[in-house]
Image: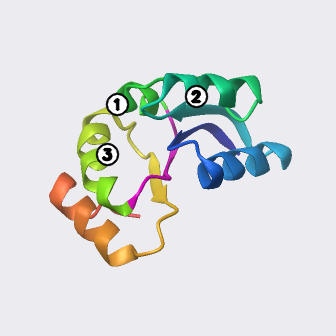
């Protein structure tokens, strides 16, 4: 079970993933992060997320899994912001459709692709 899941980009894809994981009992707590506090407050009202933070580095603190559901062009910037705040052993994944650009963004932000 995922104790704390952080969804960065609580839109249609990220929100649907969070809802489905919760429905199946695979996650205990869901933290959302986005640039829009109003959007995040609505997601909390709909019980898609339990809490939120517009500061992505604060949102990922303590999460054992982080899912990036942001545009591909934003991946590197998000990786750079969350890197120092990630818990040891946290799993970071994405829902982007093009993996080479995501891998390159991770390598540029972290200096290497984190181990699996």
Q: Which residue is mark 3?
A: 78
* Residue 40 tag number: 2
Q: Quadrant of the C terminus?
A: bottom left
Q: Secondary structure at mark 1?
A: helix
Residue 114's spot in the image, x, y percent? 30, 59
Relative vertical location of residue 38 with respect to residue 79 in this rendering, above or below:
above
* Residue 26 tag number: none
Q: Mark 2 Cα within 10 Å, few/some/many (few <14, many 20+)?
A: many
Name the front one of labels 1 and 2.
2
Q: Residue at x 47, y 23 (%)?
A: 53
Q: Is residue 104 magenta?
A: no
Residue at mark 3 to residue at mark 1: CA–CA distance: 9 Å
Q: Is 102 or 74 nearer to us in this picture?
A: 74
Residue at mark 2 to residue at mark 3: CA–CA distance: 17 Å
Q: Residue at x 71, y 41 (%)?
A: 27
Residue 63's spot in the image, x, y percent? 50, 35
Q: Secondary structure at mark 3?
A: helix
Q: Secondary structure at mark 2?
A: helix
Residue at mark 1 to residue at mark 2: CA–CA distance: 16 Å
* Residue 57 tag number: 1
Asked if residue 24 shows in the view, the reply is: yes
Q: Mark 1 Cα within 10 Å, few/some/many (few <14, many 20+)?
A: some
**Along the polypeptide, which appears first: circle 3 or circle 1?**
1
């Amino acid at each position: 079970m995922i104790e704390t899941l952080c969804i960065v980009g609580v839109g249609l894809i990220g929100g649907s993933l969070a809802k489905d994981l919760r429905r199946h009992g695979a996650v205990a707590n869901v933290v959302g992060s986005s640039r829009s506090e109003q959007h995040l407050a609505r997601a909390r009202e709909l019980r898609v997320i339990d809490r939120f933070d517009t500061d992505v580095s604060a949102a990922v603190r303590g999460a054992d899994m982080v899912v990036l559901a942001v545009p591909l062009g934003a991946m590197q910037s998000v990786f750079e912001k969350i890197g120092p705040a990630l818990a040891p052993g946290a799993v970071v994944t994405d829902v982007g459709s093009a993996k080479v650009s995501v891998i390159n963004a991770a390598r540029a932000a972290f200096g290497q692709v984190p181990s699996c």
